């Protein structure tokens, strides 16, 4: 078995393959393994694939329970909204600045948790000093400081990855032309926030519809995005939850406080109203007449 490892390294990993991601390298390995299934070792009659098909029925089944193979780290989020894991840096939502998070580093990805809630997920970086910055993690900051948008590293990476599309660029240009750089950038950030609860393709469709109508407001983009989803027969939201259980009483038409919602579940009060006649007599008596 050890000699076959050397065979695989000499024939498929020499020279060292150049890839842009671990996914591309794993895809190459899958092609190599498929080619090896038809090879015969030495003077054997059967191929490697035929021998494995004969032996696989004798192997123990894989365990049903998942087993975590990642390494756990607990870095602190710095003031730039970044965490450092094995000489690489990754962004997390800006609201977690200064907090300690839990990171699970796997062979191909990195998952960040705060408590039991997943707050970020990145493909694993391998180059020393590499950084991955997600634009969505800093939208609240950019909403308060829109001037930092144009030259941000997060925007540059979003453009390279294709998440910040030509439609976003066109909307940004139209909004800045109509409202100025500051207000126009704020409109863009509001549109980018829509991606958190609407499908990416629906938001793009909403942007195009809004631009076609000469509008540059996030509300119009959201409305057109929901129309695009409903036209395709899909739910407009990314995550769909079931309806809340009905409460006794009138149908709520506005926001109701938690105490008011709890009060609806209480039984009605059947006690008679208190009589206040005798208390009214006390109000007419002066202090000197009091016993």
Image (cartoon, rainbow, N blue to C red):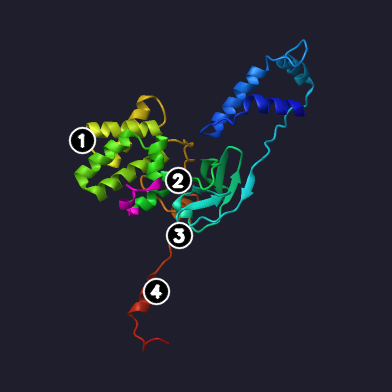
Q: Horizontal and vertical percent for residue 193?
A: 37, 43
Q: Nearer the viewer, mark 4 or mark 2?
A: 2
Residue at 72% of width from left, 29% of height from top? 62
Comes first in the chain, label 4 or label 3: 3
The crowd level at tag 1 (other Cα within 10 Å; few <14, some 14-19, many 20+) is: few
Comes first in the chain, label 1 or label 3: 1
**Element on which disc 4 rests:** helix
Closer-to-camera residue (198/101): 101
- The quarter of the picture where residue 110 lies is top right
Q: Nearer the viewer, mark 1 or mark 3?
A: 1
Q: How much space separates mark 4 and mark 2, taking CA atoms?
A: 71 Å
Residue at 36% of width from left, 45% of height from top? 253
Inspect this view and state whether residue 252 appears: no
Q: Residue furthest front?
A: 15
Label 1, on which residue? Answer: 214
Q: Horizontal and vertical percent for residue 117?
A: 55, 47
Label 3, on which residue? Answer: 272
Residue 147 versus residue 241 in the image, above or below: below
Q: How many marks?
A: 4
Q: Horizontal and vertical percent for residue 28?
A: 58, 25
Label 2, on which residue? Answer: 133
Q: How much space separates mark 4 and mark 3, taking CA atoms?
A: 17 Å
């Amino acid at each position: 078995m050890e000699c076959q490892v050397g065979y695989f390294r000499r024939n498929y990993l020499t020279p060292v393959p150049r890839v842009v991601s671990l996914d591309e390298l794993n895809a190459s390995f899958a092609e190599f393994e498929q080619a090896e299934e038809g090879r015969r070792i030495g003077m054997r009659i059967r191929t490697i694939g035929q021998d494995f098909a004969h032996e696989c029925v004798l192997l123990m089944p894989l365990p049903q329970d998942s087993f975590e193979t990642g390494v756990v780290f607990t870095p602190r989020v710095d003031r730039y909204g970044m965490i450092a894991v094995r000489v690489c840096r990754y962004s997390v939502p800006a609201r977690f600045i200064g907090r300690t998070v839990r990171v699970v580093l796997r062979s191909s990805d990195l998952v960040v948790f705060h408590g039991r809630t997943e707050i970020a997920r990145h493909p694993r970086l391998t180059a020393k000093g590499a950084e991955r910055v997600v634009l969505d993690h800093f939208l609240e900051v950019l909403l308060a400081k829109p001037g930092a948008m144009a030259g941000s590293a997060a925007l540059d990476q979003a453009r390279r990855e294709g998440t910040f599309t030509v439609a976003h660029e066109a909307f940004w240009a139209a909004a800045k032309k109509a409202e100025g750089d500051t207000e126009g950038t704020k409109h863009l950030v509001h549109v980018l926030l829509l991606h958190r609860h609407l499908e990416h393709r629906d938001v793009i469709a909403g942007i195009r519809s809004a631009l076609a109508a000469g509008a540059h407001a996030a509300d119009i983009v959201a409305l057109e995005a929901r129309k695009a989803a409903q036209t395709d027969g899909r739910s407009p939201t990314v995550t769909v939850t079931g309806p809340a259980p009905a409460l006794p009483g009138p149908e709520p038409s506005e926001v109701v406080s938690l105490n008011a919602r709890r009060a609806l579940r209480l039984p009605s009060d059947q006690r008679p109203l208190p009589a206040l006649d005798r208390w009214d007599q006390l109000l007419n008596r002066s202090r000197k007449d009091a016993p």
